[in-house]
Amino acid sequence: MLILSLVSRMHMPPPIGTLVLPQSRASQVADLLAREIRGGHLDPGEKLPTEQELIGRFGVSRTVVREAMASLRSQGLVVSRQGSGVFVANPDENSVFRIVASEVRSLADISNVLHLRLAVEVEAAGLAALHRTEQDLTAMEGHLKAIDAAIAADESAVQSDYGFHRAISTATGNPYFERFLHFLGPVIIPRQTVRPPSETPKQRSAYLAHVQDEHRRLLQAIERGSVEAARLSAREHLVAARERYARLNRRLSES
């Protein structure tokens, strides 16, 4: 059975040398089904098993299944038909650009994502400095406070970091910037994908504090309404991230 084979794969160890994003159960279910759809094992128009069947076969909760289906819909892979169920979408009619967690599996992938962010977020920062409102600034500050709290609690702060960058995209006044960051998703925050080997809690906190300093400079430039300073701060932040992961890549290559 196809779904049973997928269940067994949920518990398989990752291939040696592959960097795997820590995933929730919903992400695991969504990614496994997405592979089957993209691989042609589930045909366009084919009905997926019912919610109850997926719960039983994957051994997960109703919430997990619903979150997985929402993820597949956001990727344009399935469509819901009221009263009929969930069906595999026609790829020609529902093509959606998205970077999914399972595609970012190496330091080279991370570098490529950061290159893409440079092309978009530098300009977004400049526009945010030009158009930001007090509400936008409050939202950005709120995310930075959440990051501070996460650092104090020795947590990763990935969602708050992502929220900060999305708040900047919202402040541009251009909804397409916000939608683009939404489609990229939290996978744009590279530290959830790979962490340095033997990293201590103290080293992690120091790293996050340094990143937070970069965030603060960016927010201050936006708050001042300085377009060029905001662009420069955004560029410095993203280039610094690329350089950090390039150093990590060299360390892993030498070890």
Image (tube, helix red, strand yellow):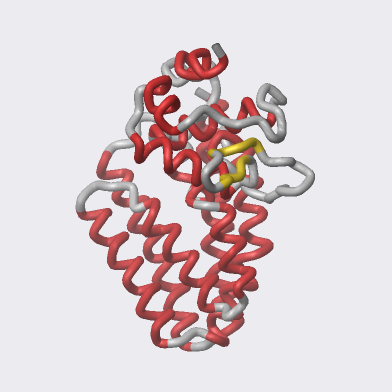
Question: Horizontally, is 243 left or right of 120 in the view?
Answer: left
Image spot of residue 146 (x, y percent):
29, 62
Nearer the observer, 231 or 185: 185
Q: Is 120 located above or below residue 58 in the figure?
A: below
Q: Residue at x 33, y 33 (%)?
A: 61
Question: Horizontally, is 118 left or right of 19 in the view?
Answer: right
Nearer the observer, 248 or 41: 41
Q: Residue at x 60, y 52 (%)?
A: 114
Nearer the observer, 48 or 135: 48
Q: Residue at x 39, y 54 (%)?
A: 159
Q: Is 103 located above or below residue 1 in the figure?
A: below
The picture quadrant where one finds residue 32 is top right
Q: Is 42 located above or below residue 246 in the figure?
A: above
Nearer the observer, 104 or 219: 104
Q: Residue at x 66, y 46 (%)?
A: 112
Q: Is 186 located above or below residue 29 in the figure?
A: below
Question: Is residue 35 something one can see in this rendering?
Answer: yes
**Residue reaching furthest to the right:** 92
Image spot of residue 85 (x, y percent):
54, 39
**Residue reaching furthest to the front:** 83
